[in-house]
């Protein structure tokens, strides 16, 4: 099959690899119909995630048609078109029973924090991902959801990560009616966090980034206010000015470890690797939220440590909430929002690229060229299947 292949930082290509096979009775093999590139893939692409091995196939956001099932699979049949949450989870451990699917205890033998994730290095279990023609889906009775007949596949593929992560980011903010919510990051996750903040009762939503075309998009798509951080001085003072000097009720980090905006953070976090990436947004969020407010973090940070102003958080009495998204938990509600017309995720897709051109697709997304917000890769077999319909 054709699949994306990691050769080292900034070096990827599409190449032929062996087809995946059923390795366990509850596996399925899925023929990929769509696979997105995520901001999280950029951390891998930039060489920032430990134990990202040469030869890995990335891709944790995909839909596909079930091609083959193992003998114990009961909930899926060959021919089903499914969306596959980025978390690989068992559904029955201590954490899964509490719907913390992102923290499954059984699917990642290498770590005590995160559970298994498709195509996300050996730090997340070493599973191959879906930027390929076929992918092995373990625990096939648990993870995948059959795409409802009235749901567009472009919407479905965004339900594997970006939409539920944005939603959970807002949910963890414990937004109360009328709250002012500041969201750092106008990428796909920040855009859906902004949409979700309104759904959860926010009275004011402000999105911060420095890429103008993304700020323009989110203003229109999520009817929010925006701040280009290059145009303001101190972020906390600016947010306080905008909020009667109290600070925001809720601040949400949808940026993570590659945050721009502070030369010192970039130097210590990205280049010298003295901390697990740049903690700029953690500083901005903790310092911009009001006393007693909530900071919600879904931006990804590395496994070692970051220097954060924890004293300010304590003295202000903040609530800090964070996690990998538990995608499956949010799906029923989010599918309902889409069916009712309250959410239209596919509007964020700016690029549809043949899998053969995966190297260009990463370059364009990473460098924010061509007004890129979200890229969907289409494998050759999926293209010929579409033509045959
Ligand atoms: P993205 O790279 O498309 O978007 C990130 C945005 O942040 C960019 O537009 C960038 O310009 C902006 N940015 C950079 N520095 C900033 C700063 N200091 N202040 C404000 N904005 C800044 O990525 P994405 O797909 O939207 O993902 C966002 C983050 O969420 C990534 O860290 C990703 O790894 C993480 N993520 C987490 C989960 C989870 O389950 N917790 C799931 C998906 C993605
Ligand atoms: Zn993702």
Image: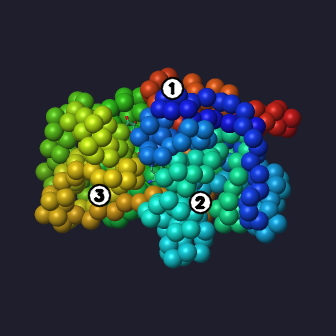
Residue 25 in the image, given as x and y percentages of width and height: 77, 65
Question: Which residue is at the front of the view, 108 or 314?
Answer: 108
Q: Out of 38 and 218, give the one closest to the viewer.
A: 38
What residue is shown with label 2?
Answer: 88
Circle 2 SS class:
strand
Q: What number is the disc on residue 364?
A: 1
Q: Residues within 10 Å of mark 1 (few under 14, many from 20)?
A: some
Q: Which residue is mark 3?
A: 295
Pinpoint residue 140: horizontal percent, then vertical percent: 71, 62
- Quarter of the image holding residue 26? bottom right
Residue 268 vs 336, above or below: the answer is above
| Earlier sequence position, callout 2 versus callout 3 | 2
Q: Earlier in the sequence, mark 1 or mark 2?
A: 2
Between marks 1 and 3 in the image, the one whose residue lies nearer the viewer: 1
Which residue is pictured at 24% across the width and 39% down the height? 268
Q: Is residue 121 visible?
A: yes
Q: Residue at x 72, y 33 (%)?
A: 16
Q: Secondary structure at mark 3?
A: strand
Contact between marks 1 and 3 (CB within 8 A): the answer is no
**Residue 322: x and y, percent?**
37, 60
- Which residue of the protein is positioned furthest toward the right in this rendering? 388
**Gap between marks 2 and 3, in whole Å?**
27 Å
């Amino acid at each position: 099959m054709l699949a994306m292949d990691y050769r080292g930082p900034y070096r990827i290509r599409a190449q032929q690899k062996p087809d995946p096979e059923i390795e366990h009775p509850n596996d399925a093999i899925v023929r990929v119909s769509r696979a997105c590139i995520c901001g999280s893939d950029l951390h891998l692409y930039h060489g920032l995630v430990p134990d990202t091995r040469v030869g890995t196939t990335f891709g944790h956001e995909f839909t596909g048609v079930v091609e083959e099932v193992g003998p114990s699979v009961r909930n899926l049949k060959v021919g089903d078109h499914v969306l596959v949450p980025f978390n690989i989870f068992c559904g029955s451990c201590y954490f899964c029973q509490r719907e913390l699917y992102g923290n499954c205890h059984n699917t990642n033998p290498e770590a005590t924090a995160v559970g298994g994730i498709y195509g996300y290095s050996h730090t997340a279990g070493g599973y191959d991902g879906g930027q390929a023609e076929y992918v092995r889906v373990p625990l096939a009775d648990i993870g995948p959801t059959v795409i409802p007949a009235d749901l567009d596949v472009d919407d479905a593929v965004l339900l594997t990560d970006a939409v539920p992560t944005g939603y959970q980011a807002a949910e963890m903010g414990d937004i109360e009616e009328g709250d002012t919510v500041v969201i750092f990051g106008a990428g796909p996750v920040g855009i859906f966090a902004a949409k979700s903040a309104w759904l959860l009762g926010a009275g004011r939503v402000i999105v911060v980034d420095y890429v103008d075309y993304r700020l323009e998009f989110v203003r229109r798509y999520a009817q929010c206010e925006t701040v280009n951080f290059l145009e303001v001085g101190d972020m906390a003072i600016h947010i306080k000015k905008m909020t009667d000097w109290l600070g925001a009720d809720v601040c949400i980090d949808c940026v993570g470890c590659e945050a721009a905006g502070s030369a010192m953070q970039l130097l210590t976090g990205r280049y010298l690797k003295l901390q697990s990436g740049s903690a700029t947004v953690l500083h901005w969020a903790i310092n911009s939220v009001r006393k007693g407010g909530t900071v919600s973090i879904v931006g990804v940070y590395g496994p070692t440590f970051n220097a954060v102003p924890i004293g300010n958080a304590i003295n202000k009495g903040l609530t800090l909430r964070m996690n990998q998204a538990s995608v499956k938990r949010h799906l029923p509600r989010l599918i309902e929002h889409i069916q009712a017309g309250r959410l239209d995720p596919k509007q964020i897709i700016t690029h549809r690229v043949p899998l053969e051109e995966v190297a260009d697709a990463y370059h364009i997304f990473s460098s924010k060229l061509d007004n890129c917000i979200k890229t969907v890769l289409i494998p050759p077999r999926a293209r010929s299947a579409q033509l045959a319909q």
